Image: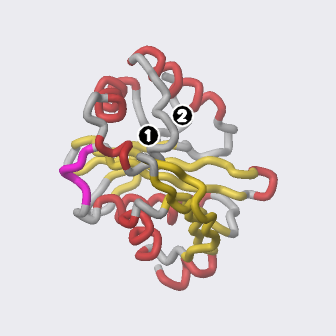
Amino acid sequence: MPKLKKPLKLTTSLVTLRSIEEEDIPVLYPLIYGKNAEWKKWDAPYYPLEPHTMDSYRSHEYARKRRLAPDEPDSRLLIEVDGIIIGTVSYYWEHKPSLWLEVGIGIYNPAYWNGGYGSEALKLWIGYLFQTLPLARVGLTTWSRNERMMRVGEKLGMKIEGRMRKVRIYQGEYYDSIRMGVLREEWHQQV
């Protein structure tokens, strides 16, 4: 896996966010792609999880890092709690020329759900992105069944900016797609 100019590490008293290294792949792979991937029931289950072997996942991570521009921060970091990998945070460009960026988070181990780890990790991540990139807004897209994710967004000062009604079908039921966002000035007022 290519090394970034400087591996990134962000820390609070609760979580650490850090760059993914080669030795993390054998730990991450079963968390994400294991047979009992409970997290996927909440993270856009209407999109199938890309099938990967450990080698293809390694190649996927390698390619992701190579696509980053020299001045661009790493687009995906590990979430660790007491040295244990529990998930990842990420960002992607919805429209890079207008700096429209969306964030994501996955806590792969259900034992770490509802403990404040996701909120803390996402708060650290969004703060870092506002500090590092000239963004006017950071967005988050989820779906109406994932009420925990909507509460995390609200807790971090995000507002519902759009609701596309009945556009996601999961287990035969319709759900809404939810777009949330926070503006730079709103973020700085609350921090």
Give the quarter of the image for residue 68. Answer: top right
Q: Type of residue at label 2? A: Leu
Give the x, y percent position of residue 93. 67, 49
Q: What residue do we see at 38% from left, 58% from top?
A: 121
Q: Bounds of the magenta span?
A: 109-113
Q: Can residue 130 be seen in this view?
A: no
Above or below, 177 relative to 57: below
Q: Is residue 190 on the magenta stretch?
A: no
Picture mark count: 2
Residue carrying label 1: 19
The amino acid type of the residue labelled 1 equals Ser
Tell me where residue 9 appears, x and y as whole percent.
Answer: 41, 48
The residue at the point 23 percent across, 49 percent down is 110
- Disc 2 crowd rating (10 Å Cα; few below 14, some 14-19, many 20+) is some
Badges 2 and 1: C-beta atoms under 8 Å apart? yes
Using residue 53 as the reference point, say whether residue 4 is left or right of it.
Answer: right
Q: Is mark 1 on a helix, strand or loop?
A: strand
Q: Magenta region, mostly helix, strand or loop?
A: helix
Pointer 2: what residue? 4
Q: How far is the residue under mark 2 from the one under mark 1? A: 9 Å
Residue shown at 69% from the left, 51% from the top: 94
The earlier-in-sequence mark between 2 and 1 is 2
Q: Which of marks 2 and 1 is in front?
A: 1
Mark 2 residue element:
loop
